[in-house]
Image (cartoon, helix red, strand yellow):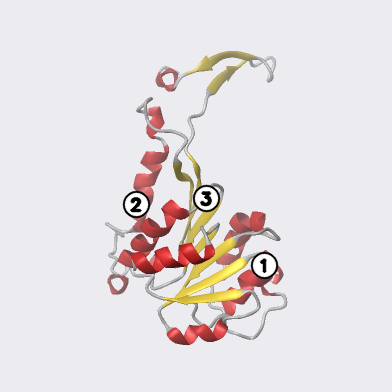
Amino acid sequence: MFESFLRGISQKPTFKWEHYFPIYETHLNKYRNLDVTLFEIGVLGGGSLEMWRQFLGPRATIVGIDIDPSCKEYVGHGIEIEIGDQSDADFISRVISKYGNPDIVIDDGSHISSDIQSSLNLLLPAMPKNSTYLIEDCHTLFHAAWGGNSEATGTLLDWVRNQFNVLHRHYIDPDADSGSLAVTGLHVYDSVVVLDIGFSKKFKAFQIAAASPILVTQELSPEDFTQL
């Protein structure tokens, strides 16, 4: 089922839920065999770094980020390791300076709610157009042991809900900024949140004549939809 990820990797352990692999295929397949940079926060076992190398191809730069110095043993074959705290602004800044802005971020780190948010705040502004930020094991947001709670209140999920509002703000405020780097897509799965990063944009809507799909009869404004 997961041959495109697992073919050719070593016996280093890889810890992933089985339903993550179709999500990877959906959102990361477009980066295969391109000059891209992937940051994976959380290196446990080292196997997932080799999985990304196998999946993305030899042109990708794979960077593992972990607080455990022993993870340095996984350096090699196109894989780099940086030791530091995912919520440390200075450390993250140094990693970006060394490897460039990441096209892909996989947060499989501490899973502590505050760390997830800190990494997001630090890395998201550095990501280029058409990049992807993927956060794993979001079920931890519902558990106090990881700084969450039974409703996930005040966690990443509240941030995602707010991003839905931000994504649609130009329908309410015609003067809202466009053309700036922003979250352009939100995908929420069981235990996984995926963010599409691009430039915010205002879209046009048109009324199409029913008799001819190619005939535009008039351009609509957001206010028109309140009257339909």
First reached walking from the N terminus: tag 2 or tag 3:
3
Secondary element type, mark 3: loop
Q: Nearer the viewer, residue 114 or 217?
A: 114
The N terminus is located in which quarter? Answer: bottom right
Secondary element type, mark 1: helix
Instruction: Classify 10 Å Cα crowding around label 2: few (below 14), some (14-19), many (20 and above).
Output: few
The answer to which quarter of the image holds residue 24 is bottom right
Whether the residues at callouts 2 and 3 have beta carbons within 8 Å, the answer is no
Q: Nearer the viewer, mark 1 or mark 2?
A: 1
Q: Residue placed at 43% from the left, 72% from the top? A: 109
The amino acid at mark 3 is Pro
First reached walking from the N terminus: tag 1 or tag 3:
1
Q: Residue placed at 47% from the left, 35% from the top? A: 179
In the picture, the disc for residue 55 is: 1
Tell me if residue 28 can be seen: yes
Q: Residue placed at 49% from the left, 60% from the top? A: 134
Horizontal arrangement in the rendering, residue 184 relative to residue 3 (left or right): left
The amino acid at mark 1 is Phe
Q: Position of residue 215 (x, y in %)?
A: 67, 15
Secondary element type, mark 2: helix
The C terminus is located in which quarter? Answer: top left
Residue denoted by label 3: 128
Say how many tags the image has: 3
Horizontal arrangement in the rendering, residue 66 relative to residue 20 (left or right): left
Q: Residue lying furthest top in this view? A: 217
First reached walking from the N terminus: tag 1 or tag 2:
1
Q: Position of residue 152 (x, y in %)?
A: 31, 60
The amino acid at mark 2 is Trp
Residue denoted by label 2: 159
